């Protein structure tokens, strides 16, 4: 029984090899050729698209300009703040000794003890 099944298996292998060596059916050849043409067209389109420089939309350009304006305004404000910090005339001078001087609270005469 084992020899019989081995022979059948060998026949199947030979048939499979024969099918693999035969040319493909016309439909498969046709669709394979069509796929290869589409692939080539897509590669050419991608190559052409990569050659054309990218130009940003108008809205993107506008928002980039707005961001640049904001950055310059912030930098100018920082510069003004630094100038104000460094300008000695702009600072208010406070006599901290006088400002922080503490005085003892006054005590009413009712609580005073006479030393007599």
Image (spheres, grey):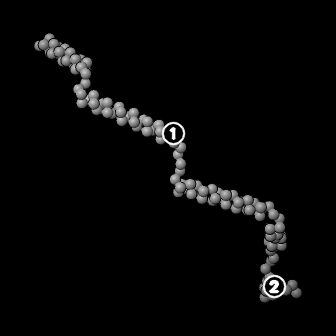
**Which of the marked residues, 1 or 2, is nearer the chain's N terminus?**
1
Q: Secondary structure at mark 1?
A: helix
Q: Residue at x 79, y 83 (%)?
A: 107
Give the residue pinned by disc 2: 112
Give the residue pinned by disc 1: 51
Q: Residue at x 88, y 87 (%)?
A: 116
Position in image of residue 12 (x %, y %): 18, 18
Q: Nearer the viewer, residue 96 or 55?
A: 55
Q: Nearer the viewer, mark 1 or mark 2?
A: 1
Q: Residue at x 81, y 87 (%)?
A: 109
Proximity of marks 1 and 2: CB atoms separated by less than 8 Å: no
Position in image of residue 62 (x %, y %): 56, 57
Whether residue 2 is visible, yes or no, is no
Whether residue 102 is visible, yes or no, is yes
Furthest residue to the right?
116
**Location of residue 37 with respect to 53 vertically, above or below:** above
**Location of residue 59 with respect to 28 vertically, above or below:** below
Residue 93 figure quarter? bottom right
Position in image of residue 21 (x %, y %): 25, 18
Q: Residues within 10 Å of mark 1 (few under 14, many from 20)?
A: few
In the visual, does 28 lie left or right of 98? left
Q: Secondary structure at mark 2?
A: loop
């Amino acid at each position: 029984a084992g020899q019989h099944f081995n022979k059948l298996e060998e026949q199947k292998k030979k048939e499979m090899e024969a099918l693999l060596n035969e040319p493909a059916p016309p439909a498969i050849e046709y669709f394979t050729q069509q796929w290869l043409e589409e692939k080539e067209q897509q590669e050419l389109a991608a190559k052409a698209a990569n050659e054309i420089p990218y130009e940003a939309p108008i809205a993107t350009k506008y928002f980039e300009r707005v961001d640049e304006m904001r950055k310059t305004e912030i930098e100018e404000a920082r510069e003004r703040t630094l100038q104000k910090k460094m300008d000695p005339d702009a600072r208010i001078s406070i006599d901290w000794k006088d400002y922080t001087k503490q005085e003892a609270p006054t005590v009413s005469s009712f609580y005073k003890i006479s030393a007599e």
